[in-house]
Image (cartoon, rainbow, N blue to C red):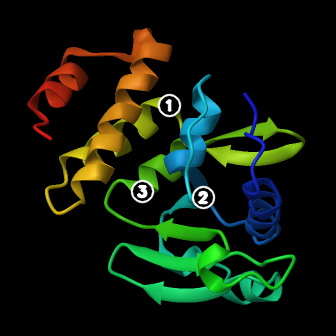
Amino acid sequence: MGLPSDDKKPTLATLVRVLAEHQTPYALIGGVAMQLYTEEPRTTKDIDIALSSFDDLPRPALKAAGFAFEARYEWSENWRAPAPDERPRKRRIAVQFSVSGDMPAVVEHAETVVIDGIPIRLATLPDVIQLKLAAAEEPARRPSKRLQDKADVLRLIEDHPELETPEIRARLDRLKL
């Protein structure tokens, strides 16, 4: 398990340090979690973090660390990472904090792993699979994103066949993308 060699590592290190310093319960999810659970490279443009509640987010500490608030939606709050140079906003790494009905359990189940010297609260593999399936089943989600989520689940159960269940297989088979 290790982080790919891309430019998210410094941002992730700063982010998890801020969250740990403020005892913020969280779980790393999304594409970066996929990168950690699979052997093949998986690209992603952002860092996704599950929270139990938006009230847990240490906004002043994030701002002090150089993160910039962008927008708040019903289920997510979006920020941009600090940049070591004068990169335009769109080239700064996006950080999405997500809160939904499933997130408190995902946060509670998260396990601390040390990746490249960075202690990270990582969502469990079964929780990542369930989140990816739910995203793939969301009809309002862009078709390309839904297809990526389905591919992520397929890759996870190929790498970890012991986690495939009849329910997971049935949900995958029902996805018409």
Q: Is residue 117 left or right of residue 71?
A: right
In the rendered image, residue 28, in percent from the top left (x then y), is placed at: 59, 51
The three-letter code of the residue at mark 3 reads Met
> Contact, CB < 8 Å: mark 1 with mark 3?
no
The residues tagged by marks 2 and 3 sit, at their Cα atoms, a distance apart of 9 Å
Callout 1: SS: helix
Q: Amino acid at mark 1?
A: Leu
Looking at the image, the residue that sits furthest to the top is: 162
Foreground of the two, 81 or 62: 81
Please determine whether, in this image, residue 139 is positioned above or below residue 167: below
Residue at far right of view:
117
**Residue with the mark numbered 3:** 103
Disc number placed over residue 169 in the picture, else none: none
Q: Residue at x 31, y 60 (%)?
A: 101
| Residue under label 1 | 125
Badge 3 marks a residue whose secondary structure is: helix
In x, y percent, where is residue 120? Answer: 73, 47
Mark 2, Cα crowd under 10 Å, few <14 / some 14-19 / many 20+, is many
Q: Is residue 93 above or below residue 151?
A: below
Give the x, y percent position of residue 22.
76, 72
Label 2: state its secondary structure.
strand
Circle nearer the N terminus (2, 3):
2
Asked whether 121 or 170 is in front, the reply is: 170
> Contact (CB < 8 A) between labels 2 and 1?
no
Residue at image coords 20%, 28% = 172
Which image quadrant: the N terminus?
top right
Nearest the eye: 23 or 13? 13
What residue is drawn where x is 64% and y is 84%?
89
- Closer mark to the observer between disc 1 and disc 3: 1
- Label 1 – label 3 distance at C-alpha: 14 Å
